[in-house]
Image (cartoon, helix red, strand yellow):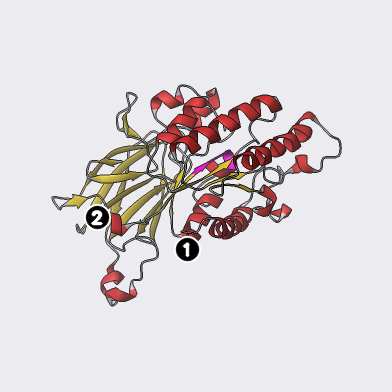
Amino acid sequence: MIFKNCQFHNITEPEQCEFGGGYLLPRYPREVRASLSERGRLVALESTGGEIRFVCDSQNIRLFLSTMDNDNGELRVYRGDYIHSTHGLQRGVINTIHLTPPERFNEIQPQHLTRRMFSPNLWRIQFDRYCALFHGIDVFGHKLRAPLAEEKPKLRWLAYGSSITHSHINGYPQQAAWRLKVDVLNKGLSGSCHCEKKVAHFLAEKSEWDFATLELGINMRGKYSTDEFKSRADYLVKTLKNKHPKKPIGIITIFPNLWDTPLQESSESIRQKEYNEVLRAITADYHDQNLFLIEGKDILTEFTGLAFDLLHPSIIGHTIMGENLARILREKISFLE
């Protein structure tokens, strides 16, 4: 999405905010958000993993940003692949972020500013887990432009799933994307990954992704029967496959958690096993090498990679997951490095 001569990565379209001004930076469009659960409508607004990207030779740049729902929300600034600075956004006020180019970039031979994923001339403003608002950018009369194709990764990965996928800017999608040298479009929905039809069509209609992963099940166990889960998961997969028959899609079973080995069986633990069998069956029914199963236990291979709730991964857990998923995707998808 190009807006105000900047690229807004992982943001559907900046929306004028009627409450206090600025532009909301959501990951899902308004009409899709309106079809989600109450929690889904909230978390779909979050700008997690979104970036404002631009190239400008000004020695002084001011960004004006705010957040609706998180005090001290982390904002990371990169020049290319290099971390430049970290800032905390205060809720309810317009924060001014003043940027100056890294002086030491001029003290090294240009060929040694090696590019892993991004051109070292590219500014990247990365949002963590909150609803961000953009109020403007001042480059003091200098030229401002969005990045060219050759200044950013060639490949884009669509990641849909629960809070574990939604995560944060240290989450497994970011970790795996760095290892694979790809851009990730994080469409995780914390606590509300319910495979709604409008979500399926929105993800299918997005044409800029090259491969996708679908982490399904954990958010639906307590509310949906196994038959309803099967119907929704199958509809999601079918919708994506019909629109993108040649693009690789990985279906991820539920990651290890306390309901794998509870002291006593419960409806959630039983349903978790049934859901995983549904995902295995959906994948097998296609007989298509571009649709493949990834077992959650092969991604989170260390149970102590979970936090104390025995459900969500710790930072170490996300690192393990990113390493393992990157390796698996390389094995499954021929065009990945």
Q: Position of residue 126 (x, y in %)?
A: 40, 49
Residue name at image x 28 percent, y 74 percent: 110
Q: Is residue 217 left or right of residue 121?
A: right
Spot the residue most to the bottom. 109
Vertical arrangement, residue 185 with respect to residue 228, above or below? below
**Location of residue 127 (image quadrant):** top left
Which badge, 2 or 1, is on the more N-terminal residue? 2
In x, y percent, where is residue 197? 51, 26
- Secondary structure under the numbered disc 2 in the rendered image: strand
Q: Is residue 285 left or right of residue 107?
A: right
Q: Amino acid at mark 1?
A: Glu
> What's the magenta region?
159-164
**Three-letter amino acid code of the residue under disc 2:** Val
Please indicate, yes or no, whether residue 273 appears anywhere in the rendered image: yes
In the displayed structure, would residue 224 be above or below residue 253? above
Report crowding for label 2: few under 14, some 14 to 19, many 20 or more residues within 10 A (C-alpha). Answer: many
The residue beneath circle 1 is: 337
Q: Is residue 25 magenta?
A: no
The residue depicted at 36 percent of the width and 71 percent of the height is 114
Q: Position of residue 158 (x, y in %)?
A: 47, 44
Give coordinates of residue 218: x percent, y percent.
65, 36
SS for callout 1: loop
Give the residue at the far right of this rendering.
Answer: 264
Task: State how far apart marks 2 and 1 are (Cα).
Answer: 27 Å
The residue labelled by disc 2 is: 55
From the image, which quarter does the N terminus lie in?
A: top left
Q: Is residue 180 above or below residue 212?
A: below
Residue 171 visible in the shown view: no
